[in-house]
Amino acid sequence: MTWIMNKKKCVILLVLTLVSATGNAQFKLYKKGHDSYTNENYADAIYNFSEYLTKATRDKSLDVDVFYLRALAYYKSNNFANAIDDFEESILLDHQNKGNIYWFLAKCNDKTDNLAESLSAYNNAVRLLDADKASSGKLLYERSHIYERMGKLPLAYADLKRVASLDPDNTAVKGEIEKLEQKDSGLRSTAVSAKPNPAAKTDAAKNENPLPKNNLRMDKKEETIPQEAEAVAIVPPPVQKPVVAKSTLADFYKDEKRFALVIGNSAYPKDIGVLKNPVNDATDLAEELRNSNFEVQLLTNATYGQIRAAMLRFKERVDENERDKTVSLFYYAGHGLQSEDENYLVPIDARVEYEDDIVRYCFPVQRMVLANMERSNARMNIVILDACRNNPFPALTRSLGQVGLGEMRRARGSFIAYATAPGSVASDGPGRNGLYTQELLKAMRKPGLTIEQVFKEVRQNVLRLSGDKQNTWDTSNIIGDFYFKFN
């Protein structure tokens, strides 16, 4: 028995030694990339950082810095398209330097003549770096050029005037203001703020009509002494209590802002497996959400890059609004899987041959979706995953050792709903919609149901219609109520 115990200890020590050695090897790749970047050897930095990101055993807490530094290396190598991808990735992984990253994004999109995306990035950089006077002035100056190229001269002019107020001695800015005024003579008048005129106020006071509002007038010579009249009992009219309109749920939530990102992926390659319902599911759900006052961003048959960019825009819209009055919702229909305690959405361009490819080509829900929603300004985050269909990579079933999606930790103020219980799968439906989304759409249309009641009804109906084979699942730590439809 002692010999067996000692043998087990040796095996454990050997495994720990191998894991430690592997971790050190991965860290060396990171350090080589960092040193190459510091020494301005950007090609080597990009190579080493890229190698590091392919290693499943790497320390993923370093990913945010790796993407950021690789983005800078791409930027300094004039590879702006790849730089944009990595800058967006580092923002979604919550890099602390988000203000400057948006600035770099703005410059990259400017270089690639994507003016709308450049403007969006400048807007976010201005919002995040507003307290820094020097940075704010430079950002406004650069943004004015984007506005000018887009033909939005009044906005360009307003930015330049703000720069001039921050730096009155900047002759270059004054010169550009004058050029814009020559282009459009009406700009000068738009910049003059309406200031109260004390003299006008005095004149108005002199001419103010002292008479009552009914404009009746009685001169003194027309005054008469009232004659005595017979006393008449005056009966006051009955006092009526004011009618107070009863508040409704819609009144209570009238200021609530609602944002949704809805994704449906169907057009997968044959080796992954084409799905019939997800695009229909996403399209129909997007329409129903619009009917429930959501601003919806709909994405169908999306690649990894498109999902990442859409997630970034979604987060930005939510962050622009007040925390206590904002609700965010993320819906995904398509292939999904779990690996190493993370759930992944499968983009249509995923090329997964080995387990390591999952991290490279699939979109992580916990790290990139739920974490960003938790960090946003939403009072409530709703995540709905109809991604528990058949395993898209059957060759990896043995190595993964698990099917379907895993249950995620509950983030702050989140309601997370799955089409089926963790570790199990649901089939693609025979009709226009999958069974889960079909019943979700029906339940959402019923007025006066809280979100918990909606998904309870979905569970009941899906169980009944599937012959007790598909058990939906949801988990929540939300505070307060939410209604898709009011009474």
Image (tube, rainbow, N blue to C red):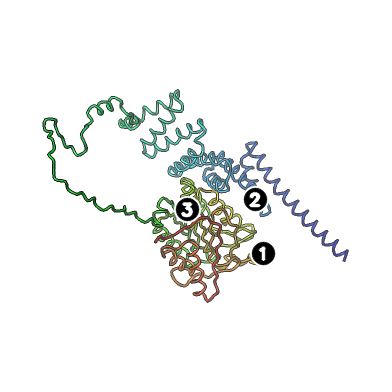
- Image quarter of residue 341: bottom right
Q: Which mark identifies residue 473?
A: none
Q: Whole-percent x and y of residue 468?
A: 54, 75
The residue to which callout 1 is attached is: 399
Residue at point 36%, 28% (across, down): 179
- Image quarter of residue 355: bottom right
The residue to which callout 3 is attached is: 327
Residue at point 38%, 28% (across, down): 177
Q: Whole-percent x and y of residue 178?
A: 36, 27
Residue at point 46%, 68% (across, down): 439
Up/down of 128 relative to 10, above or below: above
- Disc 3 marks a residue whose amino acid type is Val
Tell me how far mark 3 sits from mark 2, CA to CA: 29 Å
Q: Which mark identifies residue 60?
A: 2
- Disc 1 marks a residue whose amino acid type is Ser
How busy is the neighbourhood of tag 2: few (under 14 within 10 Å), some, or many (20 plus)?
Answer: few
Dot 1 or dot 3: first in sequence order is 3
Of the two numbered discs 1 and 3 in the rendering, the one whose residue sits closer to the viewer: 3
Which residue occupies the foreground of this view, 158 or 481? 481
Q: Whole-percent x and y of residue 247?
A: 38, 55
Dot 1 or dot 2: first in sequence order is 2
Tell me how far mark 1 sits from mark 2, CA to CA: 20 Å
